[in-house]
Amino acid sequence: MLAPMSAHAQWWRGTPKDFEDCADLAEKAKTKEDRTAQLADCNAKFAGRRKVGGGYTYYDFMQDRSFDIAGPNPTPDEQKKIDQEYTGYLEKQRRSRIVAAFNAKQLERQERPQEQPPQIEQASLHNEPAKAPVPVARPVKPRVTVVPLPKVRPQAGSCVKGTFSCEWPKLSEGLDGLKKLFAPSPPQPTKLAKRN
């Protein structure tokens, strides 16, 4: 009961006011595992980082951009502004993909001048709601089937040894000889059958 209490409670030391204070306390941890765990806690508690001239900055990795904030964490108004900026960032990304796809289509049409390009409505990228693109039928390209050319057969006098076509006549003669050996000869007509 009188055993010393573990040092989990930090109320007597004062809580850190920002990430840098928290990281300084974490560096004083006895083991590497404790230091790593405490730094992870600091990261979870404080989103902003202290700037050299005063104030804080918040890095939004989704936009790859930093925002100035008043304290170690964004206020609800600052978070709303960051979210609005992110929405604008996504809209710019969408527009650039549309423009890139349009330019690729135009380039493709320039490479095929024999076709008439379909009429395209002028699209406005300002504050209009996004509309689904209308599919355009692509011209059907004729399929070309590749038929192998027939092989030139050797002439009767020019037989390639070891090929089936060259060896077949010899094989056929041999089979005919075997048939004659093993096939019973047809019965000879009898004299009685001749008289009738």
Image (spheres, helix red, strand yellow):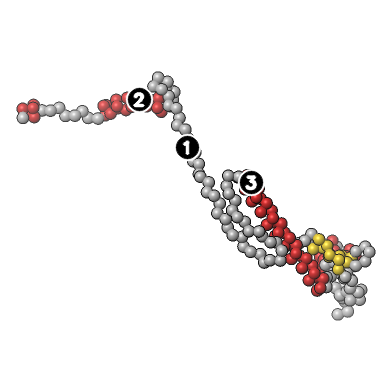
Pinpoint residue 113: horizontal percent, then vertical percent: 60, 45
**Residue 29 visible from this viewpoint:** no
Work out which quarter of the rendered image holds the C terminus and state it: top left
**Above or below, comparing residue 60 to residue 168 in the picture:** below
Disc 2 or 1, which lies upstream in sequence?
1
The three-letter amino acid code for the residue at tag 2 is Pro
Pinpoint residue 102: horizontal percent, then vertical percent: 66, 54
Q: Which residue is mark 2?
A: 169
Pinpoint residue 172: horizontal percent, then vertical percent: 33, 27
Give how far apart the Cα atoms at labels 3 and 2 are.
63 Å
Q: How many marks?
A: 3
Q: Check whether the beta carbons of the residues at disc 2 and disc 1 lie within 8 A of each other.
A: no
Pinpoint residue 16: horizontal percent, then vertical percent: 89, 71
Q: Nearer the viewer, residue 144 or 56?
A: 144
Name which residue lies at 49% across and 41% down.
145
Other residues around mark 3 within 10 Å, as few (<14) / some (14–19) / many (≥20): few
Name which residue lies at 62% across and 62% down.
132
